[in-house]
């Protein structure tokens, strides 16, 4: 299997796991409730919902393992479609919080990043930003 296909397969499995986990949580909280439609982002939602949350770099380091699949490969270009994957290590914490929050809210359009960001809580986003911004 070629490297781009391997990455695509990993992301497909990750997305399926996130979706199944989300559905399982819903089923556990409301076992007799009918399935609900996917939540749509609010039109007036703030861009930086995690601004008041203080990040923990050690926790962020543990969470960043999924980021390394693309962002940790020097010169990596995604093949579906072909575009450059930005360097996130050393970015400002404010930028990282804003970007992840916008992916989570659906304001930035990239299926893989939207799936990743939707799996993170606001605390997770702050922790990731604290860790990634500390890298040189």
Image (cartoon, rainbow, N blue to C red):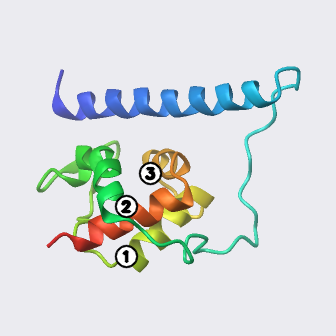
Q: Earlier in the sequence, mark 3 or mark 1?
A: 1
Are the residues tagged 3 and 1 within 8 Å (C-beta)? no
Q: x and y percent of residue 31 in the render?
A: 82, 21
Viewer-nearest of discs 2 and 3: 2
Secondary structure category for the residue under label 1:
helix
Residue at image x 46%, y 70%? 97
From this view, report whether residue 28 is shown above or below residue 122. above
The quadrant in which residue 91 appears is bottom left
Q: Residues within 10 Å of mark 2 (few under 14, many from 20)?
A: many
Quadrant for the N terminus in the image: top left
Q: Residue at x 17, y 27 (%)?
A: 2
Marks 3 and 1, how far apart in space? 17 Å
Q: Residue placed at 79% from the left, 37% from the top?
A: 37
Q: Which residue is mark 3?
A: 113
Q: Nearer the viewer, residue 56 or 78?
A: 56
Instruction: Name the side, left or right, on which 133 lies relative to 29.
Output: left
In the rendered image, is residue 28 in sight?
Answer: yes
Residue 50 coordinates in the image, percent (x, y): 56, 70
Disc 1 target residue: 93
Q: Quadrant of residue 19?
A: top right
The span from disc 2 to disc 1 (Cα, nearest Å) is 8 Å
Say which label, 2 or 1, has the lower sequence index.
1
In this rendering, position of residue 49 left or right of residue 81: right
Q: Secondary structure at mark 3?
A: helix
Residue sitting at x 40%, y 70% = 96
- What is the crowding at mark 3: few (fewer than 14 residues within 10 Å), some, or many (at least 20)? some
Task: Give the labeled residue for mark 2.
Answer: 128
Element type where label 2 sits in the image: helix
């Amino acid at each position: 299997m070629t490297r781009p296909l391997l990455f695509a397969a990993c992301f497909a499995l990750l997305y399926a796991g996130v979706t199944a986990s989300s559905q399982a949580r819903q089923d556990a909280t409301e076992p007799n409730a009918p399935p609900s439609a996917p939540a749509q982002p609010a039109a007036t939602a703030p861009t930086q919902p995690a601004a008041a949350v203080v990040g923990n770099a050690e926790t962020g380091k543990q969470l960043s393992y999924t980021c390394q699949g693309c962002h940790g490969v020097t010169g990596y270009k995604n093949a579906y479609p072909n575009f450059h994957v930005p360097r996130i290590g050393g970015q400002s914490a404010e930028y990282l919080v804003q970007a992840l929050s916008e992916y989570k809210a659906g304001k930035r359009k990239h299926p893989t990043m939207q799936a990743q960001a939707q799996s993170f809580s606001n605390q997770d986003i702050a922790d990731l930003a604290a860790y990634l911004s500390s890298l040189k």
